[in-house]
Image (cartoon, rainbow, N blue to C red):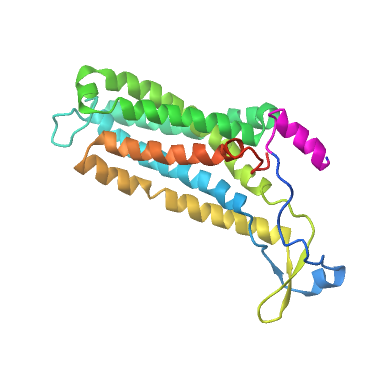
Amino acid sequence: MDASAKEDKAERGQAAYIAPLSTAPESEAATEDEIRELEHVAARLPVRVWLAATIGMAERFAYYGTQTLFQNYLQNSPDDLIPGAMGLGKTHATTVNLAFTVAVNLLPLPASILVDGRLGRYKALQIFTGIYALGSAILFGTSFPSEMRSGVALIGFILGSILIAVGLGGVQASVQPFIADQYTEQTMRIRIRKNGQRVVESREVTIQYIYNVYYWMVNVGSLGSIATTLMEKYIGFWSAYLLDLCAVVVAVVIVHLSILSHKGLFFP
C-alpha cells in the first residue's frame, strides 16, 4: 500500500498514518556479507514505540493499583478497624475478587477475535481505553465515605468493575502486538559506532529489545499497588482510585495523540 492510499485510509477513520521512520535515511543498507559477518544490534527505537509501551505501563499501574484495594473495599465496613466500603465479609469479598481476576484474564480471548477480525489494534485501543477510563471514573466517583454509607458504592463497584474488566480485556488483546507494529523498518542497515565499529541493525534483535523494554515498563507499572495501598491507609479509597484513574487517562491521551495532533502518530 503506497503513502497516498494510507493517507486516504487514515482520513476515513480506519487507521492512523505516519510516514515510515526508523534508522536515519542516509544510512546504508547492509550487504549479505555484512549481515553474515558483522554483529547484529537493536536499532534506535522511534518515539512511538516508547509511547505505545507507556500505554501498557499505565494500564498495569491502574490494574494492580485498583485490584489490590478490592479485598478491603469489599470485605470491611467503613467503621471497621481496617476501613472498607461494602462489609461483605471475607468469604464473599474473596469470591468477588477472584471472579474479577478470572474475568480480566479470560476476556482478552474473545476481545482478540474482535480486535483482529473487525476493529484493528489502534481503533480497539481507542475504544477499550475509553471503557476502562469510564469504569475507573465510576469507581472513583462512588468511593467517597458518603457514597459508602448511602449504598451507592455498591452500585458503583458493580458497574465500574464490569467496565474495567471489559476495558482491560480489550487493551490486553491489543497493546502487545500494537507495540511491535510501531517499528516498521524491514531493511537491515549499517550503523557506525563512536569507536568506528560497523554493526548491523537487525529487525529481529530490535523486536526482542522492544519487548524487553515493554516488560520492564509494565513491571514498573505494577508497583502502582504500593502507592494505592498507602493512599488507602492514610487518605482514603477515593484518593487511591483517583490515582488509578489518572493513570488510565494518561493511556487514553497517548492513544488519541494522533487525533489531537491532526496527524498520524501510530501505525494501526
Residue 95 visible in the current orientation: no
Residue 78 in which image quadrant: top left
Give residue 8's position: percent from left, percent from top. Answer: 77, 32
Residue at screen point 42% across, 41% down: 247
Q: Closer to the camera, 48 or 61?
A: 48
Residue 21, above or below 225 = below
Residue furthest front in the image: 262
Give residue 41's position: percent from left, percent from top. Answer: 68, 67
Residue furthest bottom in the image: 195
Query: Magenta span: helix, strand or loop, mainly?
Result: helix
Q: Would you say 200 lies left or right of 126 here?
A: right
Residue 257 in which image quadrant: top right
Count of numbered labels shown in the rendering:
0
Residue at screen point 35% across, 40% down: 243
Q: Closer to the camera, 236 or 229?
A: 236
Residue at screen point 54% across, 36% down: 171
Residue 154, above or below 186 = above
Give residue 80's position: percent from left, percent from top. Answer: 14, 32
Residue furthest right in the image: 32
Does the magenta portion include 35? no
Give residue 74's position: percent from left, percent from top. Answer: 27, 29
* The C terminus - image quarter: top right
* The N terminus - image quarter: top right
Residue 260 visible in the current orientation: yes
Q: Closer to the camera, 97 or 232?
A: 232
Does the magenta portion include 11? yes
Residue span colored magenta = 2-16
Q: Would you say 124 lies left or right of 191 here?
A: left
